[in-house]
Amino acid sequence: MSSAIYDFFVFPAKASARYTRMSKENRSEKVNSAIIGLLALFMAPVASQPEGTPEALAKPHDFVDLVTYCDSCHGTDGISVIPDVPIIGGFSEEGFLNTIDAYRDGERVAIEYHNPGEPETVMNDIAKALTDEEVSALAKYYSERKFKPAYQPADPEKARRGAILHKQSCERCHSENGTEAVEDSTILAGQWMPYLRRQFDNILSKKRQVPRSMYRRVKKLSPQDIDELLHFYALEGDKIHGPPSESGEL
Ligand code: HEC
Ligand code: HEC
């Protein structure tokens, strides 16, 4: 991406934090942008939007609005407090890009999800509604947030057995006990258990494609093995990333 475009996208990134506080000034800012959004909606060439495009992503929209939209489900700075929605803050850029590509290409299916009072939507439609420039800017933005583990109870005995399994078959790619956001892999340690459990189901039923050498290993796991790995990742998140996210303690 050219540096001019890059600056344009990255410059307002910090502003998203202001949104959550909602001072009077921000409220009017938000109202203004809603009006602009509405005008844009009337002027936008509707035909260019893929089917199922969430209304919030009707173009054109600016980067701050985009981040506010993502964070409405994924949490402030991408630190989700919803067990069904993954934490994405602190992912590697490549891991993030990979995931969005997989949703776009249908290599990966997502559950339907909605916030109260809003229509159901799926990550596949959201991913398709983004331009490549937006995806790159979002990948950079979320890679610069700090990953915070989900606050969730885990069984140390199961985790102990999960640690052995992890070392044997998973550490090679999910390094440092699944805590590292390296290259194309995402963070497992501290990710929400219900979300990860669903990913195992998707991988085993081939609704989600993963590298073949990972699939070969996952296929050999029993349901009990998977359970032990999930407890291991939950506990490892607490250990390595410091105290659990405050909002997760609600
Ligand atoms: C309506 C709620 C909602 C919104 C809005 C939303 N997401 Fe998601 N996102 C989800 C859910 C639910 C999942 C998990 C889906 C699944 O695979 O079952 C997900 C998954 C993801 C993942 C995969 C994480 C992983 O661990 O592999 C990424 C990356 C992501 N979203 C990025 C974004 C971005 C960027 C935006 C804004 C453009 C966004 N999301 C907006 C609900 C949402
Ligand atoms: C050859 C490298 C490799 C090995 C070995 C491997 N993985 Fe993965 N894993 C990946 C990559 C790359 C991704 C993410 C990208 C994707 O969806 O294709 C991933 C994704 C995952 C995810 C989904 C994470 C998310 O955020 O949705 C889980 C869960 C997972 N791996 C568990 C395991 C477990 C458990 C093992 C060991 C039994 C294992 N992996 C072994 C490379 C590997």
Image (cartoon, rainbow, N blue to C red):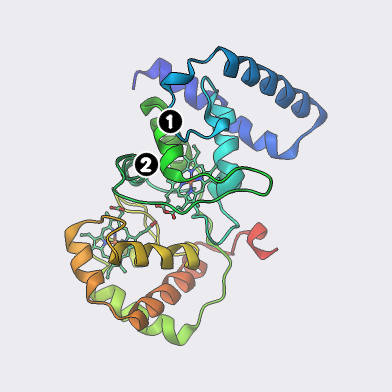
Residue that appears at 56% across and 12% down: 43
Looking at the rendered structure, the kind of residue marked 2 is: Ile
Query: Is the N terminus in the top left, top right, bottom left or bottom right quadrant?
Result: top left
Q: Horizontal and vertical percent for residue 57?
A: 53, 30
Q: For mark 2, what is the residue?
A: 100
> Tag 1, which secondary structure?
loop
Do callouts 1 and 2 mark residues in contact (Cβ within 8 Å)?
yes
Residue that appears at 56% across and 31% down: 55
Q: Earlier in the sequence, mark 1 or mark 2?
A: 2
Drawn side of residue 169 relative to residue 202, left or right: left
142 or 226, which is in the foreground? 226
For ligand 1, tell me if the residue under mark 2 lies within 8 Å: yes
Looking at the rendered structure, the kind of residue marked 1 is: Leu
192 or 46, which is in the foreground? 46
Q: How far separated are the C-alphas under marks 1 and 2?
A: 9 Å
Drawn side of residue 98 relative to residue 14, left or right: left
Q: Horizontal and vertical percent for residue 110?
A: 42, 52
Q: For mark 1, what is the residue?
A: 130
37 or 147, which is in the foreground? 37
